[in-house]
Amino acid sequence: MELEVGDVVLCTVDRIAGTVVFVKIEGNGEGSVIISEIAPGRIRNLRDYVVPKKRIVCKILRISQNGNIDLSLRRVTQKEKKEVLEQYKQEKSYKSLLKSILNEKAEKIIKEIEAEQRLFDFLQEAKEDSKDLERIAGKIDAKKILEVIQTQKQKTVVLKKEINLTSKSSNGVTLIKELLANLKNIEIKYISAGRYSVKVEAEDIKTADNKLKEILKDIEEKSKRLEILYVLEK
C-alpha cells in the first residue's frame, strides 16, 4: 500500500537517537519524528512520551524523493488515534480469520491484498462488492470469508456532542421540542436549561463522525428557520 502525506498510521518506536525518534510504520518501512513533533510545548525528556517498542499513532508530514518519511505524533487528534487503533484490532482479527480459512495460502493472499490497500479497508469493501476478494482468494474461499465476517458481531462506536438551544419566542420551548422530536436515528437527552446531549452510534468512527456532523448541521439549519439560537458546545 502506498503512503501519502496526511495519512494517519500505526507505528512502533524502534530507537531514539538524540532528539529524533525512529519508528517502524506498520507494513510500510520506517519513518522518523523530530522532538518538536512529539508534543506541544517544551519536552525535557523524550522518554516521558516514547520508549522503544511502544505503539504510537502518527501523521505523515512529508515523504522525500529518496523515501524518507517525516511523521508527527502531536498533530494526531484523539478521534484519529482511536480510529486507527480500533482498525488495527479489527485487522488482527481479520488476519486470524483468513489464516483459519485459507491455511497455508493465507500469507500469500494477505500480502497480495496489502499490496493494493489496507486489509481492513479491503474486507470492509468486500462486504458490499466481493469481486476483488473472489479474484484474489477464489469464489469458494471468498464466500467462506464473507459468511464469517457478516456474522461477526460489530462493535459500535458512540460519539456525543452537547448543544445549547434557546429561544426568545413565547412558544420557544414547544419549537425546540418539535425540532428535536423530528430528528431520526439519534439519541437526545436533556441536561439542563437549554443544554442537550446528542448521541449517535455506527459500525466505525468515520461513519459515526459523518453521521453526527450531518445531524448537527440539520439542527443548525432548522434552528435558523425557527429563530432558535443554536450553540455547539466545545
Image (spheres, rainbow, N blue to C red):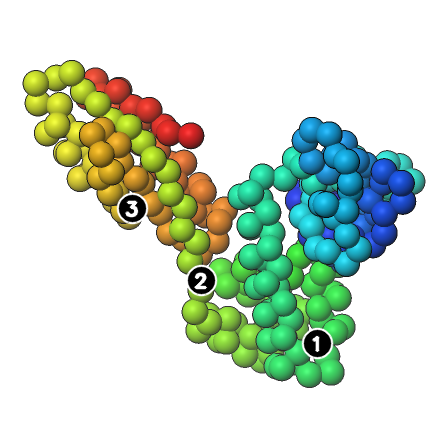
Q: Position of residue 168 (x, y in %)?
A: 16, 16
* Residue at image mark 2: 155
User: In the picture, which quadrant includes the C terminus?
Assistant: top left
Q: Is residue 29 visible?
A: no
In the picture as drawn, the residue positioned furthest to the left comes out as 170
Instruction: From the image, state whether disc 1 or disc 3 is nearer to you.
Output: 3
Residue bearing mark 1: 106
User: Gap between marks 3 and 2, in whole Å?
Assistant: 17 Å
- Residue in the image at 45% along x and 48% along y: 207
First-in-chain label (1 vs 3): 1
Given residues 233 and 25, the one toward you in this image is 233
Structural crowding at the residue carrying mark 2, measured as other residues with C-alpha within 10 Å and reported as few (<14), some (14–19) or many (≥20): few
Residue 177 point in image, percent of width and height: 15, 34
Say which residue label 3 marks: 186
In front of the other: label 1 or label 2? 2
| Residue 57 visible, this angle | yes
Say which residue appears at 62% left-offset and 82% top-offset.
100
Q: For this view, does 120 lie left or right of residue 203?
A: right
| Residue 221 higher or lower than 199, as above or below | above
Q: Tell me if label 1 and label 2 are in contact, CB under 8 Å.
A: no
Residue 180: give x, y in percent of width and height.
21, 36
**Is 200 situated above or below 182?**
below
